[in-house]
Amino acid sequence: MATTSARALRLLSLLQSRREWPGPVLAGRLGVSTRTLRRDVESLRELGYPVRTAMGPEGGYRLAPGSSLPPMLFDDEQAVAVALALQTVPVTVSGVDEGAARALATLTQVMPARLRAEVDSVRLTAVRNYWDFAGPPIDPDVLRAVGSAVHRAQVLRFDHLRADGTCPGPREPGFMPPRQVEPHHLVLWAGRWYLLAYDLSLPPGGEWAVYRVDRIRAAAATGRCFARRPLPDPDVGHYVMTRHDRGDTPAPWQCLGTVVMELPADVVARWAPGGSVVERLGPQRTRFTVGAWSWVGVAGILATFGAAFTVEGPVELRDACREIGRRLDRA
């Protein structure tokens, strides 16, 4: 009986981990025959878990969503993973820090003693990484509106603020009318949230764009659905990381300098640290603004790109480049 109960809990955990399982694969993961698997599935149904059977040559099973679904079950590895994630996730959305702490407290309360001890053994203090300057916290309502439009494939309308946080009027320089976009993906990189979207507002017939979510205001779905387009890059993360025009602004480093580098903008953007700004000047020329805790530190970052560059300023960065050059020559 104990073995059967443990197997049923393992079966429930597997069903919760993916949308659908082929019957033979699921039986193999449990180390039982397909006949035993069917009996275990019936046991879960008797307990109120809506396990659906998929038709086909091999058959399959999935756990259907619904209000009658009993509380979710975590196995040991999942419980520890969730506990660690709640402690280490970067807080980039307003108001979620308290929710994460309450979720962790709730989770540990329902854990068995042996598992609670394991989670308590990895209690930690997360210290800010000085290379990671997160963007301003995001309004949860904006994030929900954008995420819902992505999920439902509905055209999204919003205002996008300038880097200084203002929204210029129709007669002011830099005025941009409300955007109407087909939202495709949310991407979190270097502590910043980005929206990959097909912007219908851009001439002649729209084009792909990346927007900083913390600068989106008055986001609302129009109710108009769209057919998803082929992505500009199957690797969405790579596409966002190599876009030089993703709306980044310089982080508040004590030393901040600008150079013109003899490299394509997508290459510089791919390897630029968080809180730097990349501007395309030509096919092989890029203006690059980057900071560090010292001027020699800025010069060292620039040296890692292995490309020629010209310092635009300030003079302290020029002096640091000469100094680090002399040090490397002596080495």
Image (cartoon, grey):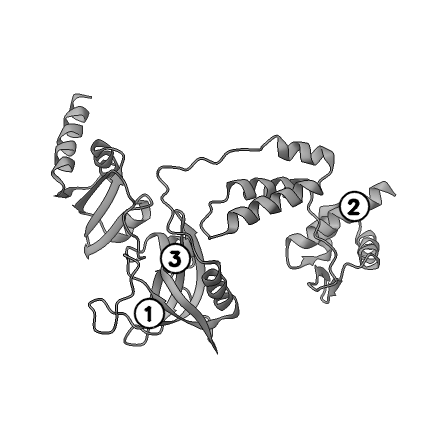
Work out whether 20 lies above or below 326.
below
Most extreme residue toward the right, as rendered? 1
Residue matched to label 1: 207
The type of residue carrying mark 2 is: Arg
Q: Is residue 120 above or below residue 271?
A: above
Q: Residue at x 47, y 60 (%)?
A: 143
What's the CA distance linking mark 3 and mark 1? 21 Å
Confirm or deny contact between disc 3 and disc 1 (CB under 8 A).
no
Q: Secondary structure at mark 2?
A: helix
Relative to 78, residue 21 above or below: below
Q: For label 2, count other residues whose C-alpha is less than 10 Å away and answer few (under 14), some (14-19) or many (20+).
A: some
Upstream in sequence: badge 1 or badge 2: 2
Q: Earlier in the sequence, mark 3 or mark 2?
A: 2
Residue ID for mark 3: 214
| First of labels 3, 1 by sequence position | 1
Query: Residue at (84%, 58%) from the top-left corner?
Result: 46
What's under tag 3, amino acid-wise?
Answer: Asp
Number of the label disc, if any, that sits on residue 7: 2
Question: Is mark 1 in CB contact (under 8 Å) with mark 2?
Answer: no
Between label 3 and label 1, give the one nearer the viewer.
3
Of residues 258 and 16, the one nearer the viewer is 258
- Which amino acid type is marked by label 1? Glu
Residue 122, picture quadrant? top right
